[in-house]
Amino acid sequence: VSKRSFQNPFKSGRRKSKWRISIEAELRQHRQRVELFSALTLKIRQSLQLKEILQTAVSQVQCILQVDRVLIYQVLPNGTGKAISEAVLPEYPTLMNLEFPPEVFPEEYRQLYAQGRVRAIANVHDPSSGVSECLVKFLKQFGVQSKLIVPIVQLPVLSAQNHLWGLLIAHQCHHPRQWIKFELELMQQLADQISIALTQAYLLEHTAELKAANHDLQKEIHTRNQAEAALRQREEFISIVSHELRTPLTSIHSALKVLATGRLGKLSAEGQQMLAIADKSAERLIRLANNVLDLQRIESGKVVMELQTCNAANLMMQATQAMQAIAQQHKITLITQTQDLFLQVDPDHIVQVLINLLSNAIKFSFPEGTVWLTVELSSLEVTFRVRDEGQGIPVDRLEQIFEQFQQINSSDSRKKGGTGLGLAICRKIIEQHQGKIWAESRPGYGSTFAFTLPALPHQMRKE
Amino acid sequence: MPTKRVLIIDDEETIQTVVQFGIKMAAGWEVLTAGSGAEGIQTAQVEKLDVILLDAMMPDMDGIATLRELQCHAETEHIPVIFLTAKTHTTEQQQLYDLGASGVITKPFNALHLPEQIAQILDW
């Protein structure tokens, strides 16, 4: 019989041989296994929902292995873990979302599983099975007799080394069960598929994160571009206005000067007074147009400081000479105490700052007052000081006056013919030299405006 | 200083007028006016001139184009040209010198001071 069957094993006979039954069962199992994998793979490809994938895995395993319970246990960072997916026969309790106490799953178990250990326990109550006592107790609550455990390891793509993400566990409750090789292999291969699904889900999530980050960045770039464009537009506008002002200002200024000669007809005293007001205002407008342009050019970086080695004494003398006539006009004594100190600066701009500070000091001094211009070297810095004996500045305004259009009060601005931009320009110039500028004052006794510039490391001797 | 003949080329009539008044009043020089580059070139070709004051920014033919045109004609190439410009930056002004300008006067200026400035630039 056995020979005949061997010759024609698939021919249907009246009696199926034992051997044939086992072949058929094996084929069926094999087909189921293939189906399970194709179903799972499909699921993994179709669905990026990890929950769905895990649920499919446990139901399929439960069905194929004919076990009482299959669950996926996720290891939590605190050392405990819980069942996050489960397929269980209705007569047995569910373990879903039940957090396993840490003592049933100690660190050494985790390490063994992370290294790929697979455990097949035929009878948890058999002392030779090596299941810890507390785990046996724990399993007893749920009627577990046999169990099969394979690790779900996170691939090294996601972490430096294999990391135990969780376990795929099959429970037999009705009776103890001897596990066979095929069952172990199936569980292992499934755990690998889940591991791939985890990687995929992780990558997807991070792709989404990256996409979101990218989107945010794009938005920010767009906003910044817009802001920059607006700033450029504003700069251009200021520049155009300042330039456009110059032509009509030339006409006004020149026409007034021509009128003032008196050669087109003598004006009455009142007429001359009106003319003087117009003339003074035109000059202030010219200064304003110049200052607005200056400030804008320095702020936008269009003016580059042309650094060269300069002697502080020369810069101070240039500024003093430029202001001497005005000081005399205001009956102010201008005292300049120079020193030969060497600096790496843009001389025109530093002289501009000195002139501006001297001009302020003279304007805000009382007649017969004195204005001092001094210089001093400390280890790293050269400090220039312009001191006056004027009315002083309230302490709370000492910072503000360096802002644009921040004179102490607007009547000062009108009386003194300032533009409200002088100190703002000074600050920009000094900052571009890596220096500091500030004001000190004793109201009623006068003010001191000081600025520092980096000193050249080796102060050259005067030749 | 002997009397001079000046041509002012500027699209702004008020500038033409104040320059004319200022120069006449301050130095007694004769001032001819032109409202565009093209008109200025025409005038320069037929009039005997000592200097041309040329506005840098004009519609249609700007100061630079006008200067180039003046340099192309035998009748006008020798006439010194001084630019009047609202551009204050040194690099912008340097460009005008590089093109062959004899001088640059920055707006706003006082027309009464022009003869003095011109004489200084041209070493009169």
Image (spheres, grey):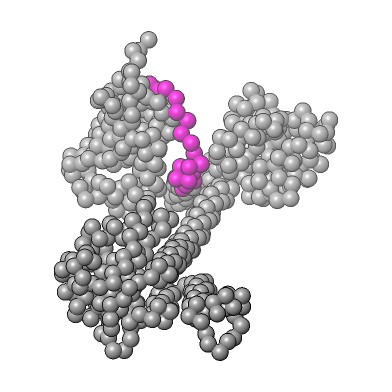
Residue A415: give x, y in percent of width and height: 34, 49
Locate residue A53 relative to residue A369 in the image: left or right.
Answer: right
Report the residue at 59% width, 86% height from top: A12
Residue at image location 38% in from the left, 60% down from the top: A154
Image: magenta residue range: A292-313
Residue positioned most to the top: A463
- Total marks placed: 0
Q: Is residue A270 magenta?
A: no
Task: Give the answer, above or below, for where A205 lies relative to A67.
Answer: above
Q: Is residue A306 magenta?
A: yes
Which residue is found at the position 66% from the left and 42% from the top?
B56
Q: Residue at x 43, y 79 (%)?
A: A64
Q: Is residue A152 above or below residue A454?
A: below
Q: Position of residue A113 (x, y in %)?
A: 31, 60
**Residue A412 in sight from this viewpoint:** no
- Give the camera-side residue of A239 and B9: A239
| Closer to the camera in the image, A210 or A314 | A210
Q: Depth check: give the residue in front, B104 or A458.
A: A458
Q: Is residue B10 above or below residue A338?
A: below
Quadrant in the picture for residue B50: top right
Quadrant into which the C terminus of chain A falls: top left
**What percent of the width, then of the height, locates residue A40?**
48, 74
Quarter placement of the N terminus of chain A = bottom right
Question: Which residue is at the front of the view, A126 or A317?
Answer: A126
**Percent x, y of residue B10:** 68, 45
Q: Is residue A172 visible?
A: yes
- A402 lies above or below A71: above
